[in-house]
């Protein structure tokens, strides 16, 4: 078995090479950005939940910020 640091990158690179579909990379970045943004938004919903502790809200805020930074990195 070949071990790779980033199996998804290897998969995408191989697919693009075999399919000759270089435009796929632009589309994938759009969907990765969208998915990271949605995850950040879901995490931020926890900030308004009165049943969640302050510690959990702090962690949710940290997670949301990381997801939004990740989304921005795909732009």
Image (cartoon, grey):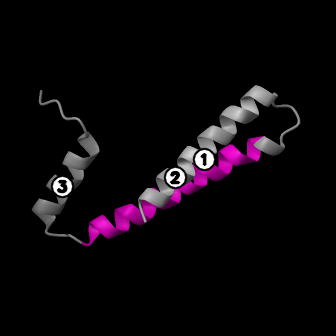
Between marks 3 and 1, how big is the CA–CA gap? Answer: 29 Å
Q: Which residue is mark 1?
A: 65
Q: Earlier in the sequence, mark 2 or mark 3?
A: 3
Q: Residues within 10 Å of mark 2 (few under 14, many from 20)?
A: some
Residue 68 in magenta? no
Give the residue at x 54% y 45%.
Answer: 66
Q: Is residue 28 magenta?
A: yes
CB of mark 2 within 8 Å of CB of mark 1?
Answer: yes
Crowd around label 3: few <14 · some 14–19 · many ≥20 (10 Å): some
Which of the image's four quarters has the N terminus?
A: top left
SS category of the residue bearing label 3? helix
Q: Nearer the viewer, mark 3 or mark 1?
A: 1
Who is closer to the viewer here, 5 or 18? Answer: 5
Residue 51 placed where, x, y %? 86, 31
Helix, strand or loop at disc 1? Answer: helix
Q: Which mark is residue 13?
A: 3
**Residues drawn in magenta:** 23-46
Residue 39 placed where, x, y %? 59, 48
Residue 51 as seen in the image, left or right of residue 27: right
Element class at badge 2: helix
């Amino acid at each position: 078995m070949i071990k790779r640091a980033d199996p998804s990158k290897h998969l995408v690179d191989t697919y693009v090479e075999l399919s000759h579909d270089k435009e796929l990379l632009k589309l994938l970045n759009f969907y990765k950005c969208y998915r990271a943004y949605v995850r950040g938004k879901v995490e931020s919903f926890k900030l308004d939940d009165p049943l969640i502790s302050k510690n959990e809200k702090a962690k949710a805020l940290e997670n949301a910020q990381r997801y939004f930074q990740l989304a921005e990195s795909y732009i």
